[in-house]
Amino acid sequence: MDIISILFYLVTSVVIISSIGLIIVNNTVHAALLLVLIFFNTAVLWLMMNAEFLAIVLVLVYVGAVLVLFLFVIMLLDIQVKKTVSKKLYLLFSVTISAIMFAELYLVIFYHDFQNSTVEIVNKNTSNTYEIGLLLFTEHIFSFEVTAFILLVAIIAAIAINMTDRQRALRQDPGKQILETKEKRLKILKDDEL
Amino acid sequence: MITMTHYLVFSALLFCISVAGIFINRKNILLLLMSIELMLLSVNTNFIIFSNYSNDITGQVFVFFILAVAAAESAIGLAIIVSLFRARNSLEINLINKLKG
């Protein structure tokens, strides 16, 4: 066993065990922290497949932004952790379906027989980031712009969904301002009332 | 020696576990969103494996787009979950049946 094999089995076993833990755990905070572990180990796996840029992006964007957002939402919502055991029927159903899917995928993978093609760490003259950037800003520039627009839509939608609570917002209501009269607001105090 | 089959089997296993997670979870919609993230991760891993196999960097460009769209999706999903929690005061999936005919 060379070092790459040891690293591969270590990383994949950590990912598989923690993803099984993610789907059966009750506490949502624990699930989010397991997801951090999964993403970090998958980034290592991506590094082993010469995808340096995407491995760094996965750690920065997912672990740094999306999972922090998850944790913020979990902390803001104050969810009661209930010990509701899901029904045996659901468990049986889910295990059966995923086992069938895995069997099918396994057959497809072995039918195509990728045995002799190895995933190697090759030394290229140009860096991975340079190659992706070259392709991204020439051939896929339209998709890149559309992605930027999708992110803008996400920002606006995420804010607009949660802007419904108008009573608490501190803003002027012109209708109420016009209907106010001097008599409602002003009162002349005499000396003996003071 | 680690061949491409190893990576593909790993990716398939991760995908199937996350599908099982979507079926099992009946109490928390946040865990469902996390399972979807896990599915997207396994699909992205597949993209990178085949990008490496065919020596074509376009697969990695696609992973970049998928990551951006998935980030947008999870942001909007979390916003929907926050407003759902405000309206229903619970995140149980069994109770979300308002649209049932």
Image (cartoon, coloured by chain):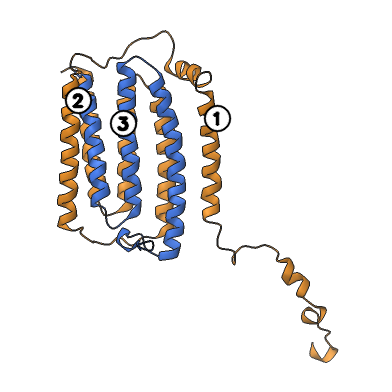
Chain colours: A orange, B blue
Q: Is residue B54 above or below residue B98?
A: above
Q: CA distance from mark 3 to mark 1?
A: 28 Å
According to the image, label 2 marks what residue? A109
Q: Are marks 1 and 2 in contact (CB under 8 Å)?
A: no
Residue nearest the viewer, comparing A68 with B9:
B9
Of badges 3 and 1, nearer the viewer stands 1
**Where residue A105 sits in the image (x, y, percent)?**
20, 31
Report how far apart the C-alphas of labels 2 and 3 lie in the structure.
20 Å
Marks 3 and 1 in Cβ contact (< 8 Å): no
Residue A183 picture location, percent across and down: 81, 82
**Residue at the spot x=50%, y=16% of the render?**
A134
- Amino acid tagged 3: Thr
**What amino acid does circle 2 point to?**
Ile
Q: Going by the picture, which residue comes out furthest to the bottom?
A: A192
Residue B99 falls in image quadrant: bottom left
For label 1, the residue is A145
